[in-house]
Amino acid sequence: MQQTNLISKNMMEDLVDDRLEELMRFSGVCCCERCRADVRTLSLNTLPAKYVMSTSGDVYVRFQSLEPQMQADIVTAIMNAIEVVRANPRHDKYFCY
Ligand SMILES: [Zn+2]
């Protein structure tokens, strides 16, 4: 009997990861691991979760294949999160570059 390993996964996580680095660099905000994790968490908290079934845990949904409105929502959520982290970095502002 074949083993299936079906799990549900929030594809929003992959979609945010897809844009996160680029938008943070574009904004000139601190890109350290800590700030990146903060921006990622804040963005995901404001976006609706979108669960999909997966057999491996890896569902790579292409950002470009999304509806334009959804792309805009994701970018807006990340940009808002970047502004929150920029205003309140969780570390001394000279800690990283
Ligand atoms: Zn930082």
Image (spheres, grey):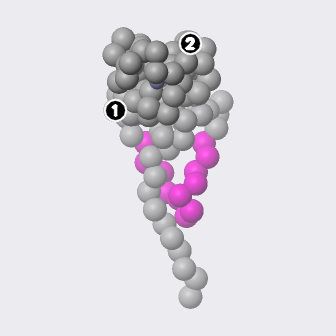
Position of the C terminus by quadrant: top right
Q: Which residue is mark 1?
A: 45
Q: Earlier in the sequence, mark 2 or mark 1?
A: 2
Q: Inspect the magenta stretch and tell me whether residue 69 lies in it.
A: no
Residue 26: assigned label: none
Placement of 78 over or under 45, stated as above or below: above
Contact (CB < 8 A) between labels 2 and 1? no
Image disc number at residue 28: 2
Amino acid type, residue under disc 1 in the picture: Asn
Q: Residue at x 55, y 35 (%)?
A: 17
Q: Secondary structure at mark 2?
A: loop
Q: Position of residue 32 (x, y in %)?
A: 51, 28
Of 29 and 63, the residue lying toward us: 29
Question: Is 57 included in the stretch rendered in magenta?
Answer: yes
As displayed, is residue 67 above or below residue 4? above
Disc 1 within 8 angstroms of ligand 1 (CB): no
Q: Residue at x 44, y 57 (%)?
A: 8
| Kind of residue sitting beneath label 2 | Gly
Which span of residues is magenta-colored? Answer: 50-61
Q: Residue at x 51, y 21 (%)?
A: 96
Circle 1 SS class: helix
Give the residue furthest to the bottom: 1
Crowding at dot 1, Cα within 10 Å, few <14 / some 14-19 / many 20+, comes out as: few
Q: Nearer the viewer, mark 2 or mark 1?
A: 2
Give the main secondary structure, helix, strand or loop, of the magenta stretch: loop
Quarter of the image with the N terminus in it: bottom right
Where residue 63 appears, as percent x and y from the top left, is 61, 32
